[in-house]
Image: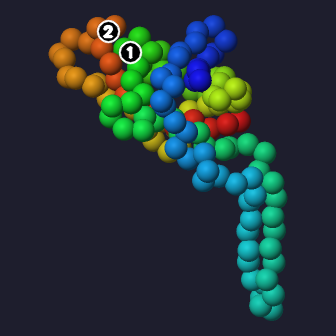
Amino acid sequence: MAITLSDGTTTVNLHPDTFWSDEANWFPVEQVAARTITGALVVSAATRIAGRPITLQPFDESSGWVQAPAVTQLRNWAAVKGQQLTLTLRAQTFTVIFRHHEPPAFEATQIKFQRDIDSADWFTVTLRLMEI
């Protein structure tokens, strides 16, 4: 299944072996509990309406590779404050931004080191995104 990121003009295809590593670790409930001066417990709860983390990464070093042009585009998007992107993953669409408050929001590691990077070189990438 295709995994894509798009700004409406440019689309980057991520490798289908890239996975959403924190998908099961988020719940739409926010809760705060506090004691009053009398010792009573006050619990406040609300439903979160945004902010779900979406971390996309390879399963291991041998999966989820992308080539240098995709890395360049992802890095360029990550360098734009508030850059909104459309993520398509498993036939679902999400509006996302990079999670710069949990750095690094974007990581790329070259598979085989070469001094001069060209468009045929392969990388693994980790994207820390957040649904808005």
Mark 2 lies on residue? 120
Q: Is residue 82 left or right of residue 61?
A: right
Q: Position of residue 31 (x, y in %)?
A: 74, 65
Is residue 54 in view from this perspective? yes
Tag 2 near tag 1, CB within 8 Å: yes
Q: Position of residue 127 (x, y in %)?
A: 49, 33
Mark 2 and mark 1 lie on one chain; the one further toward the N terminus is 1
Q: Which residue type does callout 2 highlight? A: Ala
Foreground: 68 or 104?
Answer: 68
Q: How much space separates mark 2 and mark 1, taking CA atoms?
A: 6 Å
Q: Position of residue 115 (x, y in %)?
A: 17, 16
Q: Position of residue 33 (x, y in %)?
A: 74, 74
- In the rendered image of this protein, does residue 127 appear above or below residue 83? below
In the picture, the disc for residue 67 is: 1
- In the rendered image of this protein, does residue 76 appear above or below residue 98? above
- Tag 2, which secondary structure? loop
Q: Is residue 67 left or right of residue 97?
A: left
Q: Which residue type does callout 1 highlight? A: Gln
- In the rendered image of this protein, does residue 76 appear above or below residue 109? above
